[in-house]
Image (spheres, helix red, strand yellow):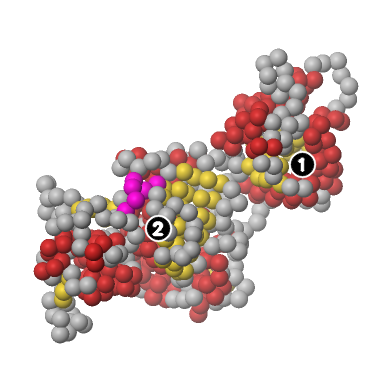
């Protein structure tokens, strides 16, 4: 096959040795040497042509434009533009795959024009940092292997499709499979029946081969997924301020299958957000919503869990601050994608396709490929500051809160001011006599344990809510209603 041409660009004086070392490495590596042909202008024979024109023509001939940026901006032409920036712009115009690697220098150590050039690159391109030649080689190797995989020049099984060598069908929960089938039939018209054998369902979902189950099956339906993938947990933290600081007011580590992880993490965030109730105008049911719509919270958390890199030792982290929600996951964008692309409708390239499909079938993912665009759209619709997507060593989504909600905006009794936002939200939605499930539904919560622990029990202990059958807490028809003190307080909320 024809080898893939790589144009290596940088300020010559600053990275002369690094360029030559990288050129030699690409030619001599047993894997990369089979597929790539690096180009360096140092090895171009002397010709009677403009050097700039030659270099730009070589950019056009190449498949990949690889750029190394450091402290020096370099020689400037009559327009004040360096050859490196000219080459970068030319690669952009000709839609070349661009790989940019930055030194670890601080912005203050760089030439001002070099810093401006780097900012321009960072607005549209994911880049990696390095501190030594060996780190540069390692970063280039990883990027080029990903290029080969995504172009399907070499093939490796995704993590979720890899057959687990130690697990078997006994490690799966048959009841979870039935719940999935029932939900998928209702949501997406899944063709199998609830009574179908577990092996039949797994076969339909491409999660089993010769009695060996794929990693995705364990993440979706495992009895104890963390026994096989300890890093698949989700860590949630709530901070009163705008920075990570101890003591942490609320910190939870959630375990379970991916559906349970999503439900628990979403409920954690909602339990710390302010819930407002509207008025009855056209609808009998009182409209209400969270300061950050649940759709945004759920989309961001589902994306983090569905598309993360499960080979990483890192975990998904959900952090709620006074001014924003941050959701981190160990993962990277598809090669050549930018964070700006995520804000628009785009094709679906799931990092874990066998994991994403069942989550779509069960309604956790509404439409494949639209999650991040939906986050931006909904935020714009409700007047929130536009969310940010940041690709570094991890992928991060930042969603901004409209205002700090730790303190109520009206004068409340001291005891209620000290109460949690969960109790105040419960009082806002409690109308007449309601069963537990209906209160949870009104608050868009799924996890019963979280609701009882953080909402219902505190409200009962504080005397704002009472049971219809107080002498029989486990009464099958138990309902909850506002106590007199709760009615007085609700008027102020």
**In x, y percent, where is residue 417?**
26, 62
Residue 21 is left or right of residue 77, and the answer is: right
In-image side of 456 versus 133 (left or right): left
**Residue 240 numbered mark, or none:** 2
Residue 389 in the image, given as x and y percentages of width and height: 49, 45
Work out whether residue 357 can be spotted.
no
- The residue positioned 59% from the left and 48% from the top of the image is 392
Q: Which percent across, then down, holds residue 367?
A: 40, 49
Residue at 23% x, 64% y: name it. Answer: 414
Q: Is residue 121 magenta?
A: no
Q: As displayed, is residue 219 above or below residue 332?
A: below
176 and 264: which is toward the camera: 264
Q: Is residue 117 above or below residue 145?
A: above
- Say if residue 279 shows up in the picture: yes
Q: Main secondary structure of the magenta part?
A: loop
Q: Earlier in the sequence, mark 1 or mark 2?
A: 1
- Specify start and end residues of the magenta stretch as a single range: 400-405
Looking at the image, the residue that sits furthest to the bottom is 471
The residue lying at 33 percent from left, 47 percent from top is 403
Q: Identify the image quadrant of the C terminus.
A: bottom left
Name the one closer to the observer, 172 or 457: 457
Placement of the N terminus among the 4 image quadrants: top right
The residue to which callout 1 is attached is 36
Circle 1: element type: strand
Nearer the observer, disc 1 or disc 2?
Answer: 2
Up the image or down, 455 lies above or below 68; here it is below
Q: Residue furthest right?
A: 46
């Amino acid at each position: 096959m024809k080898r893939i041409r790589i144009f290596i660009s940088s300020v010559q004086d600053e990275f002369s040795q690094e360029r030559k070392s990288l050129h030699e490495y690409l030619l001599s590596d047993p894997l990369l040497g089979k597929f790539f042909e690096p180009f360096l202008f140092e090895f171009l024979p002397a010709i009677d042509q403009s050097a700039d024109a030659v270099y730009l023509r070589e950019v056009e001939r190449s498949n990949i434009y690889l750029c190394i940026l450091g402290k020096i901006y370099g020689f400037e032409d009559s327009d004040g533009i360096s050859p490196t920036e000219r080459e970068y712009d030319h690669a952009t115009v000709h839609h070349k795959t661009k790989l940019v690697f930055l030194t670890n220098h601080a912005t203050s150590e760089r030439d001002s024009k070099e810093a401006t050039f780097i900012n321009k690159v960072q607005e549209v391109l994911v880049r990696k940092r390095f501190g030594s030649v060996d780190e540069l080689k390692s970063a280039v190797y990883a990027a080029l292997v990903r290029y080969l995989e995504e172009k399907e020049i070499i093939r490796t099984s995704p993590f979720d499709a890899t057959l687990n060598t130690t697990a078997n069908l006994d490690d799966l929960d048959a009841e979870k499979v039935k719940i999935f089938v029932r939900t998928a039939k209702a949501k997406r018209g899944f063709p199998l029946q609830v009574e179908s054998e577990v092996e039949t369902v797994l076969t339909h979902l491409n999660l089993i081969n010769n009695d060996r189950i794929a990693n995705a099956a364990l993440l979706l339906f495992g009895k104890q997924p963390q026994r096989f993938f300890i890093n698949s947990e989700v860590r949630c933290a709530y901070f009163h301020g705008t920075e990570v600081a101890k003591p942490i007011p609320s910190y939870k580590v959630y375990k379970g299958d991916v559906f349970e992880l999503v439900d628990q993490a979403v409920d954690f965030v909602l339990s710390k957000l302010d819930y407002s109730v509207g008025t009855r105008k056209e609808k009998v049911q009182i409209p209400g919503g969270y300061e950050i719509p649940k759709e945004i919270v759920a989309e961001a958390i589902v994306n983090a869990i569905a598309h993360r890199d499960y080979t990483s030792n890192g975990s998904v982290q959900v952090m709620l601050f006074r001014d924003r929600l941050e959701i981190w996951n160990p993962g990277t964008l598809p090669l050549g994608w930018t964070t700006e692309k995520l804000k628009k409708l785009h094709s679906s390239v799931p990092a874990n396709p066998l994991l994403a499909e069942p989550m779509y079938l069960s309604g956790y993912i509404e439409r494949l490929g639209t999650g991040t665009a939906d986050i931006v759209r909904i935020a714009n619709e409700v007047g929130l500051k536009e969310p940010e997507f940041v690709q570094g060593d991890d992928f991060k989504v930042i969603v901004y809160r409209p205002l700090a909600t730790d303190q109520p905006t009206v004068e409340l009794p001291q005891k209620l001011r000290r109460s949690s936002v969960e109790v105040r939200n419960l009082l806002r939605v409690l109308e007449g006599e309601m069963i537990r499930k209906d209160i949870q539904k009104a608050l868009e919560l799924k996890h019963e344990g979280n609701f009882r622990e953080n909402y219902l029990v505190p409200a009962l202990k504080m005397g704002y809510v009472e049971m219809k059958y107080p002498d029989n807490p486990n009464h099958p028809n138990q309902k909850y209603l506002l106590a007199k003190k709760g009615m007085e307080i609700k008027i102020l909320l």
